[in-house]
Amino acid sequence: MQDIELINIKELILSDNQNLAEEIRGRLTENRVFMLNVMASPGAGKTSMIVAAIRRLKRKYRIAVIEGDIDSMVDSQKIIDEGVVAIQIQTGGDCHLDAGMIQPALGKIDLEQYDLIFIENIGNLVCPAEFDTGSHKRMMILSVPEGDDKILKYPLMFSVSDALVVNKIDANSLFDFDTDRLRDRAAVLNPNMPIFEASCKTGEGIEKWCDWLEGEIAQAF
Amino acid sequence: MQDIELINIKELILSDNQNLAEEIRGRLTENRVFMLNVMASPGAGKTSMIVAAIRRLKRKYRIAVIEGDIDSMVDSQKIIDEGVVAIQIQTGGDCHLDAGMIQPALGKIDLEQYDLIFIENIGNLVCPAEFDTGSHKRMMILSVPEGDDKILKYPLMFSVSDALVVNKIDANSLFDFDTDRLRDRAAVLNPNMPIFEASCKTGEGIEKWCDWLEGEIAQAF
C-alpha cells in the first residue's frame, strides 16, 4: 500500500505568502522605505491612529497608506484628507491582507518617492495575524471598550505584534479595563512587546508610540 | 484544446456547509429546540448579551450555550456561573464557526432536555457571516465604540443578520455614534432587520430584544 501524500493547502498558501513577503521586504529595504502593518478589531481606531501619526510625522517622512477594506472607501478618504496618498485594496470578502495583495498595491507607487508606508489591515484579530504582508514591523491596537481579556482569546495576534497600542484610554472610567492585568499577561506571551496607552481623541500617548516608530525606522536601515 | 475545469474550493466548502446546516436545523426543529447564532466584533458584548438573556429567560426555557473561542474558556466560565450548560468549541485558529463544528457540539447534549441554544460565534465581522451554522436565526451586535460606519465596511454581516443589537449605549456621550445614520443605511441594506438599542451594563433595551427572540421562538415551531 502506498503512503498517502497529504497536501496541506493552508501550509502551502502560508509558505508561498512568506516567500513573497520576504521579497517585498527586501525591495522596500533597498529603497529605504519602512512599512508598518497596523492590525486591530473593527472600530478599535486603526484609521484614527494612522491619521494621528501622519499629522505628527508628515513633515519628516514622505508617507503613503495602503488601505485594506472589504467594501468601502471611507478610510481612504480620511487619509487623502490629510494630504497623503492612499492606495485602496478592496478584498471583496477576504478577512485579511496578504503579501499577494500588497505587491500590486506597491506597484501603484514609485517607492523612491516614499519613506514610510502604513498598511491598515482588515478589522479582525484572527487571520491578519497569520499572514506576513512584507512589512518591517507589525503593530496592533486594542481599544479599551473591547476589554483586557482579548489577549486570552486572540493570543496569536498579541504574539506576533512588535508593539501594542491601547487606544481610547479617555473612556477608561466607563469600562472595566485593567491595564496591569493586560501587561502581566503580555509579559508572559510576548515579553519584548512595548505597550503604549493612547487616545486619538485627546492626543494623549500619541507622541510615545510615534517615538517608538521613529526608533524602528532608524534601526531598519 | 480541452476546457479547463475550475474547482472552486470555497464554493465547495460553502455548499457542503450549507447541506450540513440544513440537516442540523431540521433535527433541532424536530426536537423543538431553537438555536440563535450571535455574531459580533471582539469585545462588542456577545457573552454579556447572552448572559443578560439567560437571566431573563431561564425560568421559561431550558438553555444551553455553544461557545466558540480560539484559545480560552473565559466565556464558558461566565455561562456556567449562570447555572447554564456551556459547550466549548476551541477552533485553534479558525476565524468562524461552521456547521461541521456545531454538529459535534450538539452531539454532547441531549436535545430533548433543551428549548433554546445560543451560539456565541468567534469575534469577527467577516467570516462568520459566510457560514450557516444550522441556527434558526442570526443576530449581530454592534457596540457604540466601534462606530456607526461598520455597516459600510462589513455589509455582508449586516445583510445576513435577522436582528441587530446596538450595545453599550450607556457610552453614547463619549463616542460620535449616530444611530439615525446607522438606521438609514440598514434600511437600504437589510430593510426587514429590527434594530435594538441596549446596554448590558444598565440593562436598558434588554427586554425588547428578548421579546423579539421570544417572538421568533414562538413562530419557529
Image (tube, coloured by chain):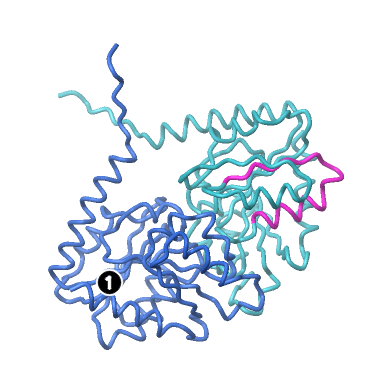
Chain colours: A cyan, B blue
The span shown in magenta is A46-68
Query: Residue at horizontal 43%, vertical 82%?
Result: B206
Is B35 above or below relative to A58? below
Query: SS class of the residue under badge 1?
Result: strand
Disc 1: CA contacts within 10 A as few (<14), some (14-19) or many (>=20): many
Kindly identify which residue carries mark 1: B117
Query: Residue at horizontal 27%, vertical 88%?
Result: B59
Q: Which residue is more in the foreground, B133 or A128?
A: B133
Residue A51 part of the magenta-drawn span:
yes
The x and y percentages for residue B135 are: 27, 64
The x and y percentages for residue B13 are: 29, 43
Q: Chain of mark 1?
A: B
Position of the N terminus of chain A by quadrant: top left
Query: Residue at horizontal 64%, vertical 44%?
Result: A119
The x and y percentages for residue B31 are: 14, 71
Is A105 above or below relative to A158? above
Position of the C terminus of chain A by quadrant: top right
Residue A21 part of the magenta-drawn span:
no
